[in-house]
């Protein structure tokens, strides 16, 4: 049986007989002690309350435990995870600026070791600020590592500015040169760092369009481009071009040209081109894998491409007239030195200090002779001459009259795959990318039921089932290598 709740207000009872007032006083004292203890809990300064029990009880490691694990990971070269723990340690430990600066430098080195150069640069910048002037040797090391990070990131323009900032004696703040204004358009400022970023973006677009390049080749391409961009005259021209295009675009918008149908059609065409190329790049990166067997097969199919063909190296002395050239031939036949005459009398400033030797050899195939073009008679005389022989007559070119010396003959040289594997790998990758792109486009043609009618534009009966991808490189070794050979005999 349930007992009903008693909702009546209890009536006060008569107090018990007083025992000298001691019970009331004891109650008051207990109440005061309780309030004091509660107040101590709320007003105690941070760090004065013992939290070791709470930390242990919650299962959360303390700062010293995290530090110990971070050192252990660091010793085992588990760099990224060690850096993460050191950063947690920084959040938990009560360190001076000098101590924190040293820890951040330690984190930066770990980030560099794990290839996280952007995060490493940030930690180096913080460490430098926190250390101040307290450790000159360490600050110098930080400066070296900052430049190294920028190089690894391919930020070559920023490398030059970083080194310039550090070379400035008495500079108030590193990076000040990056905030200098290089141009101003209607009140809008373009700083050095913004200008460098524009140039870097141009370089990245150019690099990304070159399929098949290894990371090392991409970085080398970036470096060469930034070296070109470092030229003051080039930078001045590029700045003028960028500012001119911005001013023109601003004026065009004021005239509402960006709203015209012609502009939108052209913009759509450019957008289609960019989107299409972006998709091709992504598909090539996904499918365009190359194995060692692919490289070896490509090399075997293109041995002529990688062989150094038979050729003849020649030297020449350029004279103003046929009579002068004949006189030089006579003097050499009488014992004069071809090399000495070339150095003192040749009109060719590019070869006179190189014993008159031309950098490009005469190929055994065909009739082409450097500086002369197709010349069957001269080609036959050079190929039929003996090493160190002076041809018995002078030959004319648009530059003047030439005394020709056959320096040496080179037989065909087969280059072993292992000596040129990197080059063959790049060529194989380019061929695979082209194959992948053409196959991908063909698949899209079939999916979208594309039909081409080349006869309607007078293109004959070309097979429309084999689309061509642009700019991907040769699919085999059939393309002629037109690069100019430079060698020494």
Image (tube, rainbow, N blue to C red):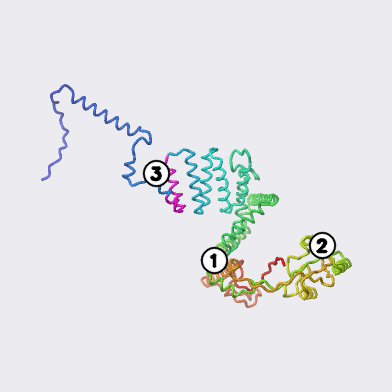
The disc placed on residue 64 is 3
Residues rendered magenta in the picture: 72-93
Reading the chain from its start, which is encountered first: label 1 or label 2? 1
Q: Nearer the viewer, residue 464 or 370?
A: 370
Please provide percent x and percent y for residue 146. 56, 47
Q: Quadrant of the N terminus?
A: top left
Nearer to us of marks 1 and 2 is 2
| Helix, strand or loop at mark 1 | helix
Q: Residue farthest to the bottom?
A: 461
Reading the chain from its start, which is encountered first: label 2 or label 3? 3
| Quadrant in the rendering for residue 261 | bottom right
Please provide percent x and percent y for residue 366. 73, 75
Estimate the spatial distance between the alpha carbons at disc 2 and disc 3, rounded to whole Å: 78 Å
The disc placed on residue 123 is none
Residue at label 1? 284
Estimate the spatial distance between the alpha carbons at disc 1 and disc 2, rounded to whole Å: 56 Å
Q: Nearer the viewer, residue 462 or 213?
A: 213
Q: Residue at x 83, y 60 (%)?
A: 344
| Helix, strand or loop at mark 3 | helix
């Amino acid at each position: 049986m349930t007992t009903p709740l008693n909702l009546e207000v209890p009536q006060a009872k008569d107090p018990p007989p007083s025992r000298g007032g001691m019970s009331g006083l004891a109650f008051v004292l207990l109440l005061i002690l309780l309030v004091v203890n509660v107040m101590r809990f709320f007003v105690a300064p941070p760090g004065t309350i013992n939290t070791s029990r709470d930390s242990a009880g919650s299962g959360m490691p303390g700062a010293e435990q995290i530090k110990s694990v971070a050192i252990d990971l660091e010793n085992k070269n588990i760099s990224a995870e060690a850096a993460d723990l050191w950063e947690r340690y920084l959040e938990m430990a009560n360190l001076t600026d000098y101590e924190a600066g040293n820890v951040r430098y330690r984190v930066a080195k770990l980030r560099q070791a794990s290839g996280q150069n952007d995060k490493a640069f940030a930690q180096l910048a913080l460490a430098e600020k926190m250390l101040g002037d307290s450790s000159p040797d360490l600050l110098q090391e930080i400066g070296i590592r900052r430049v190294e990070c920028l190089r690894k990131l391919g930020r070559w323009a920023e490398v030059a500015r970083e080194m310039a900032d550090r070379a400035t004696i008495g500079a108030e703040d590193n990076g000040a040169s990056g905030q200098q204004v290089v141009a101003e358009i209607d009140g809008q400022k373009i700083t050095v760092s913004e200008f460098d970023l524009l140039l870097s973006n141009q370089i990245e677009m150019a690099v990304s369009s070159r399929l098949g390049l290894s990371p090392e080749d991409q970085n080398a391409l970036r470096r060469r481009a930034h070296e070109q961009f470092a030229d003051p005259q080039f930078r001045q021209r590029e700045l003028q071009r960028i500012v001119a295009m911005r001013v023109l675009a601003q004026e065009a918008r004021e005239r509402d040209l960006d709203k015209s149908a012609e502009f939108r059609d052209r913009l759509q065409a450019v957008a289609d081109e960019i989107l299409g190329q972006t998709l091709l790049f992504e598909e090539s990166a996904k499918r365009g894998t190359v194995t060692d067997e692919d490289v070896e097969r490509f090399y075997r199919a293109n041995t002529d491409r990688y062989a150094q063909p038979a050729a003849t190296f020649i030297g020449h002395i350029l004279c103003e007239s046929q009579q002068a050239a004949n006189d030089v031939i006579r003097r050499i036949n009488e014992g004069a030195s071809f090399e000495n005459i070339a150095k003192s009398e040749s009109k060719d400033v590019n070869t006179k200090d190189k014993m008159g030797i031309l950098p490009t050899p005469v190929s055994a195939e065909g009739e082409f002779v450097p500086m002369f073009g197709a010349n069957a008679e001269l080609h036959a005389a050079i190929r039929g001459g003996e090493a160190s022989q002076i041809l018995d007559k002078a030959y004319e070119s648009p530059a003047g009259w030439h005394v020709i010396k056959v320096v040496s003959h080179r037989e065909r040289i087969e280059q072993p795959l292992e000596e040129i594997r990197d080059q063959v790998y790049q060529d194989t990758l380019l061929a695979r990318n082209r194959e992948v792109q053409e196959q991908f486009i063909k698949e899209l043609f079939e999916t979208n039921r594309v039909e081409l009618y080349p006869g309607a534009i007078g293109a004959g009966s070309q097979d429309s089932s084999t689309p061509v991808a642009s700019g991907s490189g040769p699919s085999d070794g059939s393309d002629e290598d037109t690069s100019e050979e430079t060698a020494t005999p």
